[in-house]
Image (spheres, helix red, strand yellow):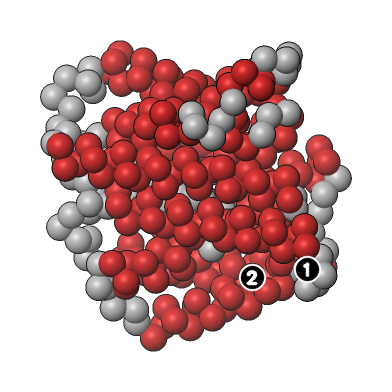
Amino acid sequence: MRNETRGTVELTLAMVLSGTLGVFVVESGASPFEVVFFRCLFGAAALGLYSLARGYLTGHGFTRRTFGLAVLGGAFVVFNWVLLFEAYAATSISLATVVYHTQPFFLVLLSALFLRERIPAGKLGWLAVAFAGLVLVSGVRPGDAASLTGLGYALAAAVLYALATVVTRRITGVRPHLIALVQVAAGVPLLLPFADPGAVSGLGAGWGWLAGLGLIHTGLMYVLMYAAYAELPTAKIAVLAFTYPAVAMLVDWAVYGHHIGLVQALGVPLIVLASLRVTLGRAAAPAPRTAARGPEAASPVATRAG
């Protein structure tokens, strides 16, 4: 019970930190590509030093195949971040975060497509419920180009996150910290052709926000999540994961005055309930022999941190 209490505190803190992610992105003043580039740079340094201090680099367990899969997953992860941060700019942190939490449904569809996993009728029903919630949450009219664009970015980010999860589930025998390290480190050369590091030279205080994204929202947050995963039952992990969008909406309202309307609010519990049911349903199923212990699948429930 003592370990479970500690795990609850650790995962709650990790999800609260994740909920403040949008503020760090916006306040940095940098473009999404530069934000993710420096998040990867600072995050790789933080995770690398932590792994070195804990002795994880010795006997890392990577093979050529699993290392290649980690790099591929990293490509999906970093461009998922780029699209999510583009969604923040095009719409709002609240709307982008809620729509981003359609990830479990894309994971179900992609698993059926690539892993040939059967989709039970019950899950199809929950997918329909989530779609109804998505329509309500979007709250946009066909002529509202900016909000429609933001919605598209958030959905595309969710698809890339689901692809990263499918790939990462194929990795075995490697600590999740090391998979995360490879993924964020891979983001540095991957994003270099798209980012202009020199463009952020005049950010001033923005550097503190960028460093925070790497050190706090990547290094510290991942360490807290992985520690909690080892101590908590699946059901509690699934429930605590929704601290993230709740905090994100609260922070967006408190800092920027953004809030979702009444009709949009009706869609939030539909997405949350459907996501929870689908996630717990996947966790209850027998784990595949290739189940990963990685940053997006290090527990029976993929905690959808940004």
Horizontal placement of 288 versus 76: left or right?
Answer: left
Q: Quadrant of residue 134?
A: bottom right
x, y (%) of residue 210? 61, 24
Taking 30 as reference, is 298 left or right?
Answer: left
Judged left or right of residue 141, residue 284 is left
Q: Position of residue 262 (x, y in %)?
A: 82, 68
Which residue carries the number 1 mark? 140
- Mark nearer the viewer, 2 or 1: 1
Q: Amino acid at mark 1?
A: Val
When asked about the image quadrant of residue 268, the answer is bottom right
The residue that mark 2 highlights is 134
One can see residue 131 in this view: yes
At which x and y percent is residue 42?
Answer: 49, 21
Observer-nearest of 17 and 58: 58
For the question of whether residue 280 can be seen, the reply is: no
30 sits left or right of 262 in the view: left
Asked which quadrant contains residue 98, the reply is: bottom right
> Mark 2 packing: few (<14 Cα in 10 Å), some, or many (20+)?
many
Amino acid type for the residue under numbered disc 2: Leu
Q: Is residue 125 above or below residue 33?
A: below
How many residues crowd mark 1 within 10 Å: few (<14), some (14–19), many (20+)?
some
In the rendered image, the quadrant that contains the C terminus is top right
Q: Quadrant of the N terminus?
A: top left
Mark toward the start of the polypeptide (2 vs 1) = 2
Return the residue found at the far front. 193
Q: Position of residue 121 (x, y in %)?
A: 39, 86
Q: CA distance from mark 2 to mark 1?
A: 11 Å
In this view, the residue in front, 280 or 135, is 135
For this orientation, the residue located farthest to the bottom is 121
